[in-house]
Amino acid sequence: MADESDRDRAVQEAIEAERRLLDPDVRASPSLVSELLDPDFLEIGASGRRWDATSILTVTSDGSVAPEAPVEVTEMSGAVLAPGIVHLTYFTDHSGRRAWRSSVWRLTDEGWRLYFHQGTLTS
């Protein structure tokens, strides 16, 4: 079993990757987003819609996260579920649209890739 420092490093690397995905400059670039998505990526959005890698690239590259209105992230934490698998949870506020979020990251030969994401709207 991995020691605590390995687990902490895995969680930190997944958090860094998640924060990159939330960066407006990264989101505006389909190639940069693609580098962070697992080929089997699936999202159940806060809207209830189901997304795959192809459909989410259309949305992330449409300018929905403008530099002047970034996504505010709080309470981000993570846990190693198994070697190479990290689960993150956090809260977002994007222009008053508030949601709890959950992401599962998988370590691949290419680095950490987002495998699953779900958002749930909250008040």
Image (spheres, rainbow, N blue to C red):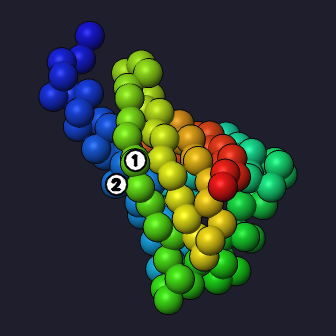
Count how many numbered circles sit on residues in the image: 2
Rendered view: 46 above or below 95:
above
Check if mark 1's residue and mark 2's residue have beta carbons within 8 Å.
no
Q: Residues within 10 Å of mark 1 (few under 14, many from 20)?
A: some
Residue 30 is left or right of residue 18, and the answer is right
Looking at this view, is 123 or 22 the one in front?
123
Provide residue 68's location: percent of width, then percent of height.
50, 89
Rendered view: 79 above or below 90:
above
Between disc 1 and disc 2, the foreground one is 1
Work out which quarter of the rendered image holds the N terminus and state it. Answer: top left
| Residue topped by disc 2 | 16
Looking at this view, is 88 or 108 the one in front?
88
Residue drawn at the location 84% of the way across and 51% of the way down: 49
Residue drawn at the location 56% of the way across and 41% of the way down: 102
| Residue topped by disc 1 | 76
Rendered view: 80 above or below 34:
above
Q: Residue furthest toward the front?
A: 123
- Of the numbered discs 1 and 2, the one sitting upstream in the chain is 2
Provide residue 38's location: percent of width, then percent of height.
58, 45
Provide residue 77's location: percent of width, then percent of height.
37, 40
Q: Residues within 10 Å of mark 2 (few under 14, many from 20)?
A: few
Regarding residue 53, the answer to whether it shows in the image is no
Looking at this view, is 87 or 123 the one in front?
123
Residue drawn at the location 48% of the way across and 41% of the way down: 89
Residue 64 is left or right of residue 21, and the answer is right
Residue 115 is left or right of residue 113, and the answer is right
Q: Which amino acid is tagged 2?
A: Glu
**Gap in angstroms between the C-alphas marked 1 and 2:** 11 Å
Q: Residue furthest toward the bottom?
A: 68
| Quadrant of residue 31 within the rendered picture | bottom right
Q: Residue furthest toward the top?
A: 1
Q: Check disc 2 and report its element: helix, strand or loop.
A: helix
